[in-house]
Image (cartoon, rainbow, N blue to C red):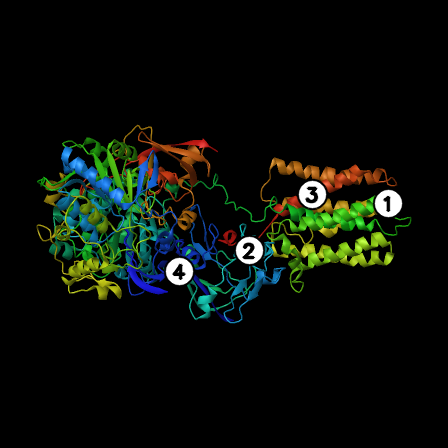
């Protein structure tokens, strides 16, 4: 389809950064935050390999993943200019759009607690002008005009994600133009040269609330199965413990928000955001499961089950936007699997044996996908499998009819934490720098 | 909001035309002015950063006086009173020449002449410097060979079929040159880049040659040898316009590719390939940079390179040119560069020009009869930019009194006794030329000076008044305060060329008498009227060989040495020398200072990417993080110049103050260092 959009010429961009300054001038971004960035290919200038740059801000995609995934409906599309606009007043600071965008366009501003991003200089474009960055490019590498929009671009720096970005590229043969040079002068040794490493955007430390929340949701779902047919009624302490843990999970889920007080907004976009669905199903799950515990009416048990499943499916679907370094439909830390395994540990040893084997196998396969190995990683993997899976497994095998001691449950949970943490290390957002 | 046309007055090739947006007396935007054919798409990141620079909270807005180690705000009255008293005391006790007037290239303009007039006619004399930090060796080499410094208009580059960037990195130092360069390549031209670094300008290069710094002349002489042997020369051109070719033919015979290879570290095959390009692809524009001539052999290096343009007949035609400096828009100057850099043959007893810019610290300390007692610095930051910072600092601290006119708290301002707030480019009109594009431009006043800021012309006026001179007499020498006097003065200068201010307010004006294709008349204002491959003047003026030779640069190839790495300190796109990096947006882009280092040199020293290292020699030391990259040739390390001491990497603490072989330039690239690991 034909649209107005950015035109980028690799052969003319020398990473001069004028576009960034022009953007900052016009939009007065709060430094060090800027909305446009210049990605550098072959940054260490490995010889006989070309180097090109890519200047990107928001591509105002026709199928904008930021807009469709935002749980708080903070994004909208300008019907006239087609600009994808972000409304800071509606943003809850969950940063999910920064995961969903394959171009690293939305930026979280920690001072304001919300995301912000390129607005296409909508004020100028609405009046028939062009974005400031394109107006300021001193070499003509970045311009704005009528383009043909493709589902995704097969160009350097463009992740293979179909968002219909409003940008056209040319001149990428500059990277192929082979410069005749003296490799010896560059001191290049292919044997000792270290591969390029990228600082991942999703990092476990920063995402600890998410690790805990998703894992707690899985364990609570599993635990809930044990409450089937309460019979004599549950001890009050169990009821209270379940309720408290559930509330804790809810509180933890808001901890990574830039604007926790706006957490309620996360449920607004149930129509297209899995994050909204996750929060809604979690809320309903909480409500119905607690009602069951305190009314002991079995109807509420059966009512809880579909919502628990919907919640766990939603949790999994939240991660459909990220790039995984493993190629598995279901991985060992899948929350549905974890919930099932935990439930089985508590109520059905035979199923538990089967699920432990599945989990162990999936875990090994995921480990095999790792790009690098360290002693620490090996040790953790050992703990995860021995303590988290084999220890509970051996207990179940040896003492089938005994009451499950707390240390076995604790061991299982420790194993799951290790697995879940590793999972966050195995995923990252799509990012142009990985494709340049 | 109002829009004004203006031009950037920095010491930069591009000299962009800009449209400035002003709202409520505040600069709020900078936009391109397509009327300038050399900079049609607008300024670089620095030009755009004027929005921050003009409104920066760090700007010096009123006079400051050092008091007990701290700067305190004082009134203009007190500041000027103190300076006037000092000046008069010094004059009485030691004579006017005990005052050093130091001005550099911080802001171009015709009004700068009034500073010199104050010192010569009002104060009655002073000491100033001779020479220049930048480009004189190449200017003099070109002047002695071609007669003058001019080249084809920038957009003619697109007519070239071969572009040789020899030590120039326009992607960073002259980004607008990339426009015609890219057009040329798109139209099938070949690009050869010769630089120890694989710079951003080499992105589309067909051939990249990475010699050891300062060995360029050896390569050029070997290429000349090949061209002559292969007959890849323009015999008709040589016969008509060149002096000394026969001698040159004999002269280059011993300079074989393998000889050049052993000196430069460039494989013979690449030298031959370079010769093939120059000999067979026409027209060629050879674009030498200014860094490559800041060595003790800089003048002869440039003469050797220029010889290639000459014998291949690539002068005076579309697409064919020696693209060093284009002074055609400097129509207002009585004496052009480089001649105006030279000390007078006979001192006039008023202005003493005994201090070399290149050896500022050393020569300041050595000045006698009278010794220096005071310095006045404007448009410059010598404590960052001049070689051998420690010496310069020592010389500064030995003085009794230091006045610095500045916009920001530079390393030099921090050493001042009194700082006077300097105007910025938007606060006073002036006329500027360019050493690259052919335009005369008006740098327009678009806002009133901020707070208590006063233009230099007004500072001198008020200072003279404090010294007791009357208005009437002063008006015959200096510029009285007020925009009407500025405009009248500029108008009078323009009228000489049938130009006027209103014309310039509409946009850049082509310099009168411009030759679009330089030397297309094949007139060369050398003593012989020909291109002088053989130049007697080289011998007479500089004591160098009349034919271009390669001489090893001082310090770089002495063996053995405790400092085995060659330090390069090129310009970066993020600064013009030491300006701009104090701005938040620029410092965000330039990041923290680093030492660029080849991974093979780093491995030998146990250094990994990101480690803190010390770069040192017997002059000084700098501590920065190491950035390992194949961009830098083995054996070289790079810290771009212009970082302030307070920003962490003042590279000139490592450089030595030496003059170039010609032109009184500064050979401050002749530096070797060692690097050691400080912290992982």
Cα–Cα span, label 1 and label 3: 27 Å
Cα–Cα span, label 2 and label 3: 29 Å
Q: Can you tell which of label 1 and label 3 is closer to the viewer?
A: 1
Q: In the structure shown, which secondary structural element does the residue marked by tag 1 occupy?
A: loop
Cα–Cα span, label 4 and label 2: 28 Å
Q: Earlier in the sequence, mark 2 or mark 1?
A: 2
**Is disc 2 in contact with disc 1, using a CB cutoff of under 8 Å?**
no
In the picture of the structure, the residue carrying the numbered disc 4 is A141
- Dot 1: within a 10 Å radius of its alpha carbon, few (fewer than 14), some, or many (20 or more) residues? few
- Residue A222's mark? none
In the picture of the structure, the residue carrying the numbered disc 1 is A235
**Is disc 1 in contact with disc 3, using a CB cutoff of under 8 Å?**
no
- Residue A115's mark? 2
Residue B445: image location, x then y, percent: 28, 58
In the picture of the structure, the residue carrying the numbered disc 3 is A417
Q: Which residue: 23% across, 66% down? A: B502
Foreground pick, A18 / A103: A18
């Amino acid at each position: 389809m034909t649209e107005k959009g950015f035109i980028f010429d690799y052969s003319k961009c020398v990473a001069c950064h004028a576009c960034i300054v022009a953007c900052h001038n016009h939009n007065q971004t709060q430094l060090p935050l800027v909305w446009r960035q210049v990605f550098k290919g072959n940054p260490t200038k490995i010889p006989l390999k070309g180097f090109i740059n890519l200047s990107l801000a928001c591509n105002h995609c026709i199928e904008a993943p930021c807009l469709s995934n935002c749980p708080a409906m903070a994004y909208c599309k300008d019907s006239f200019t087609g600009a994808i606009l972000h409304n800071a007043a509606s943003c809850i600071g969950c940063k999910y759009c920064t995961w969903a965008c394959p171009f690293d366009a939305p930026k979280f501003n920690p001072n304001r607690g919300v995301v912000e991003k390129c607005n296409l200089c909508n004020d100028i474009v609405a009046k028939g002008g062009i974005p400031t960055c394109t107006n300021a490019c001193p070499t003509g590498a970045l311009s704005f005009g009528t383009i043909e929009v493709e589902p995704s671009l097969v160009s350097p720096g463009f992740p293979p994600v179909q968002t219909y970005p409003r940008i056209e590229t040319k001149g990428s043969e500059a990277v192929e133009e082979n410069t005749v040079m003296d490799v010896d002068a560059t001191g290049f040794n292919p044997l000792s040269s270290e591969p390029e490493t990228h600082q991942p955007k999703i990092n476990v430390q920063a995402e600890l609330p998410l690790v805990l929340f998703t894992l707690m949701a899985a364990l609570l779902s599993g635990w809930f199965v044990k409450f089937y047919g309460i019979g004599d009624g549950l001890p009050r302490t169990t009821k209270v413990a379940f309720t408290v843990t559930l509330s804790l999970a809810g509180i933890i889920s808001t901890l990574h928000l830039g604007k926790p007080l706006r957490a309620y907004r996360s449920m607004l976009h149930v129509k297209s955001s899995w994050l909204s669905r996750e929060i809604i199903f979690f809320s309903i799950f909480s409500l119905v499961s607690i009602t069951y515990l305190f009314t002991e009416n079995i109807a509420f048990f059966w009512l809880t089950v579909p919502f628990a499943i919907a919640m766990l499916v939603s949790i999994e679907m939240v991660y459909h936007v990220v790039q995984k370094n493993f190629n598995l439909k279901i991985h060992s830390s899948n929350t549905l699997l974890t919930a099932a395994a935990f439930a089985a540990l508590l109520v059905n040893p035979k199923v538990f044996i089967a699920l432990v084997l599945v989990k162990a196998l999936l875990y090994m396969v995921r480990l095999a996908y790792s790009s690098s190995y360290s002693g620490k990683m090996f040790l953790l993997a050992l703990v995860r499998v021995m303590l988290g899976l084999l220890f509970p497994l051996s207990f179940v095998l040896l003492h089938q009819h005994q009451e499950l001691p707390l240390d076995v449950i604790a061991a299982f949970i420790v194993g799951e934490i290790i697995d879940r943490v590793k999972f966050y290390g195995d995923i990252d957002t799509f990012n142009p720098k990985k494709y340049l | 909001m109002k829009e004004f046309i203006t031009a950037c007055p920095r010491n930069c090739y591009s000299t962009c035309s800009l449209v400035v947006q002003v709202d409520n007396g505040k600069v709020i935007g900078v936009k391109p002015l397509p009327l300038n054919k050399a900079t049609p798409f607008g300024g670089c990141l620095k030009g755009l950063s004027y929005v921050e620079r003009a409104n920066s909270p760090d700007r010096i807005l009123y006079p400051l006086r050092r008091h007990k180690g701290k700067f305190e705000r004082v009134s203009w009255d007190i500041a000027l009173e103190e300076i006037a008293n000092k000046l008069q005391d010094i004059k009485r006790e030691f004579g006017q020449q005990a005052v050093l007037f130091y001005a550099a290239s911080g802001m171009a303009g015709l009004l700068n002449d009034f500073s010199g007039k104050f010192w010569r006619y009002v104060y009655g004399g002073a000491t100033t410097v001779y020479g220049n930090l930048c480009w004189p060796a190449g200017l003099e080499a070109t002047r002695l060979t071609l007669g003058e410094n001019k080249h084809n208009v920038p957009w003619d580059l697109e007519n070239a079929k071969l572009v040789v960037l020899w030590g120039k990195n326009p992607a960073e130092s002259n980004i607008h040159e990339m426009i015609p360069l890219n057009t040329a390549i798109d139209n099938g031209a070949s690009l050869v880049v010769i630089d120890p670094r694989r710079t951003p300008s080499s992105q589309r290069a067909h051939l990249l040659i990475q010699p050891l710094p300062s060995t360029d002349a050896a390569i050029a002489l070997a290429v000349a040898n090949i061209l002559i042997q292969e007959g890849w020369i323009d015999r008709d051109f040589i016969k008509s316009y060149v002096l000394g070719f026969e001698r040159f033919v004999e002269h280059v015979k011993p300079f074989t590719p393998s000889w050049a290879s052993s000196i430069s570290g460039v494989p013979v095959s690449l030298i031959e390939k370079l010769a093939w390009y120059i000999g067979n692809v026409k027209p060629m524009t050879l674009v030498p940079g200014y860094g490559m001539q800041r060595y003790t052999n800089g003048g002869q290096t440039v003469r050797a390179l220029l010889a290639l343009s000459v014998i291949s007949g690539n002068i005076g035609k579309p697409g064919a040119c020696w693209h060093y400096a284009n002074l055609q828009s400097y129509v207002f100057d009585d004496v052009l560069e480089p001649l105006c850099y030279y000390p007078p043959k006979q001192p006039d007893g008023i202005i003493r020009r005994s201090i070399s810019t290149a050896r500022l610290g050393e020569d300041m300390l050595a000045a006698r009869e009278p010794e220096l007692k005071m310095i006045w610095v404007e448009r410059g930051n010598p404590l960052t930019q001049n070689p051998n910072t420690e010496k310069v600092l020592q010389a500064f601290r030995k003085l009794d009194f230091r006045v610095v006119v500045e916009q920001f708290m530079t390393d030099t301002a921090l050493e001042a006794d009194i700082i006077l707030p300097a105007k910025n480019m938007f606060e006073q009109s002036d006329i500027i030329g360019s050493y690259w594009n052919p335009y005369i431009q008006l740098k327009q006043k678009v806002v009133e000076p901020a707070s208590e800021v006063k233009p230099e012309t007004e500072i001198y006026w008020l200072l003279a008044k404090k010294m007791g001179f009357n208005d009437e007499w002063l008006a015959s020498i200096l510029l009285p305060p007020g925009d009407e006097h500025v405009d009248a003065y500029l108008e009078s200068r323009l009228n000489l060329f049938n130009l006027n201010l209103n014309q310039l307010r509409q946009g850049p004006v082509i310099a009168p008498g411009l030759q679009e294709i330089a030397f297309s008349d094949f007139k060369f204002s050398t003593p012989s009227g020909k291109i002088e491959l053989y130049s007697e003047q080289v011998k007479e003026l500089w004591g160098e060989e009349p034919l271009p030779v390669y001489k090893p640069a001082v310090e770089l190839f002495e063996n053995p040495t405790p400092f085995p790495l060659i330090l390069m300190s090129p310009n970066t796109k993020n600064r013009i020398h030491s300006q701009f990096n104090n701005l938040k947006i620029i410092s965000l882009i330039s990041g923290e200072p680093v030492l660029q280092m080849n991974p093979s040199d780093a491995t030998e020293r146990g250094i990994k990417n990101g480690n803190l290292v010390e770069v040192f020699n017997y002059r000084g030391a700098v501590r920065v993080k190491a950035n390992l990259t194949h961009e830098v040739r083995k054996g070289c390390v790079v810290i771009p110049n212009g970082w302030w001491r307070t920003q962490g990497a003042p590279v000139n603490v490592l450089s030595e103050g030496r003059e170039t072989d010609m032109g009184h330039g500064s050979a401050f690239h002749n530096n070797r260092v060692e690097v050691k690991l400080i912290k992982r």
